[in-house]
Structures are given as structure tokens and as C-alpha cells.
Amino acid sequence: MQRRAFTLIELLVVIAIIAILAAILFPVFAQAKTAAKKTNDLSQLKQHGLSTMMYIGDYDDKFPAIPAAGGWTGMAANSMGPHWADRLFPYVKNKGIFSDPSNTRQLYFDQGYWKPGQRSATDTSTANLYRVGYSLNQMLTHSDVDPRTPRSASQTAIPQMADTVLMGPSLNWYSWGSCQVTNGVADLYWNVSRDGAFWGYEFWGGNKEGAGYAGGTNFAYADGSARYAKLVIRGDNGRNPDDLYAAYFRAKIRPEFSTTGVCTGDRSSVTVGY
């Protein structure tokens, strides 16, 4: 018996059905891929939280001290010593988890510290370098104190460890705070800005408004835990690529900053830190 061939109409119908199914399924696959990256990122930050707890146990209850490198007189280039990731590396022994899975940029931000994997101030080899896509909380590392007398916060001095951010996304070693007033309380949140500005890479995807995963990202906290926090765009300022405070994550770098409803001009770790 002779087989009947597909007519042109039938073939077009089949192609249309396949196209419809692809249009339905491809976004689902993309969402599943993003969800997997978000889960992986959260797992990495949880490991960083636990490794920092081990570091604290070995260093008299102190967080890693990351003083500021720029703006200090008498400080030679590359005089700041090892990157903070290299200080925590012995506790994780995995260079891959220092890189956020949603960010593919080569982040070797140079401001006096050695690059991740650099073995000395004069080491110019790139063989040992690795990517770091996370940043430490300025209030814990005291990143704004004189680098000639580095110090950091004590874990036991923090009143709300579970609500105080330890680590999150940024291209710098430490993150500044964005002061926001809500119901008469001034809080310091994890600051971000648009792509092209100093801390702007958190808005992955160029000018796309959104950060990390579904308008938010993951953070590690001072008690070793990790969880997700949403991004808040500050109105029209959120559309200015040069605005340092264009947006912030609802992840506090210091709980109970002020109950007067006023953001002070000086928000350094020395003034409002631990």
C-alpha cells in the first residue's frame, strides 16, 4: 500500500505547533536555568558564611580586616597585602565559589590590594588569578579606617547578627551603605548603582533594571546564614547611570542605625560601626 505524503498545509501546521511549543517552553527553560544559578549562588554564599565563622574562630572573634587603600598618604602601590578572598580561601579550598554564577565579568579591581591569587606585591603572573564577584560589608571590615592600623569588628559586638549582611555582590572589596528612611527610622542598606557607575555591575545586563535574580540577589549574613533580598529602585534616580545611590538592596549593613529619621552625613564604620 502506498504511503500518503504530507501536504504543504499539514507540514505548515506541524511547524506552527512546534513553534508554539518552543515559545512556551523556552522561557520555562530559561527560568529553570536562572533558578539553578540562584540556588548555586545561595549555596556559595552559605559556604562563605560558614568559612568566615571558622576564620573568626581562629582570629579572636574578628572579621577579616579590609582597610581602604585609596586616599591615604605614604601608601605605596600594592602595599595592602592579600585580597580578602585569599584570606578566606584556606577555609573553603575552592576558588570557583568566589565567583557569582550570574556575573561573567573579569573583576580585578586594582586599588592597592593584591589581586585574588596574587602571591606577592611583585607577582605579575596571571596563572594563579581567579575571579571574585562578592564584596564584604564595610561596617564589619572597617574598610574606611587608616590602612596602617587595620582593624575589624568583633562578632560578639553585633546585636543582630542574623540581620547584618556579611557579603554580597559588588566589584569592590567592601560595600558602602545607602541610608534610607522608613517610618521614621534611618537604616543602612547594601548600596548599588546603575551599570557604568562605580558599584554598578550589580545591574547585570547593561541598562536592564533588575539585579541578580528576579529583581534581587543573595547575601551571606554575620551569623553564617544566607538568604535572598529584593532590590529597591529609587524612583527617577534609578535611571541615572552616574547616580551612586540609584538603588539599594533590602539587606542591612548595620541594623538600628538611627531612630531619629535623619541620615547623618558621616556614615563611616568608625562613627556608626561596631
Image (cartoon, rainbow, N blue to C red):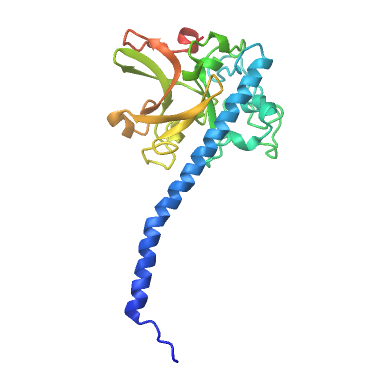
In the image, residue 32 above or below residue 123: below
Residue 207 sits in which quadrant?
top left
Residue at image point 54% right, 12% down: 145
Q: Toward the viewer: 82 or 137?
A: 137
Q: Is residue 39 above or below residue 50?
A: below
Task: Give the image location of residue 144, x and y in percent.
Answer: 52, 15
View extreme (bottom): residue = 1
- Report x, y in % for residue 138: 51, 18
Residue 58 locus on image (x, y percent): 69, 16
Drawn side of residue 140 relative to residue 187, left or right: right
For the question of whether residue 15 can be seen, the reply is yes
Query: Does 168 sit left or right of 12 as displayed?
Result: right
Q: Which residue is drawn at 40% across and 52% down?
A: 27
Residue 255 shown left or right of residue 166 in the figure:
left
Quarter of the image with the N terminus is: bottom left
Q: Nearer the viewer, residue 224 or 263?
A: 224
Where 78 falls versus 196 (above or below)?
A: above
State whether residue 5 is above or below residue 50. below
Residue 92 sits in quarter: top right
Q: How many marks?
A: 0
Q: Position of residue 97 (x, y in %)?
A: 60, 35
Q: What residue sits 46% from the left and 8% below the top?
A: 271
Q: In this view, does 149 lie to the left or right of 122?
A: left
- The image quadrant of residue 200 is top left
Q: Can residue 103 be seen in this view?
A: no
Outermost residue, front direction?
A: 1
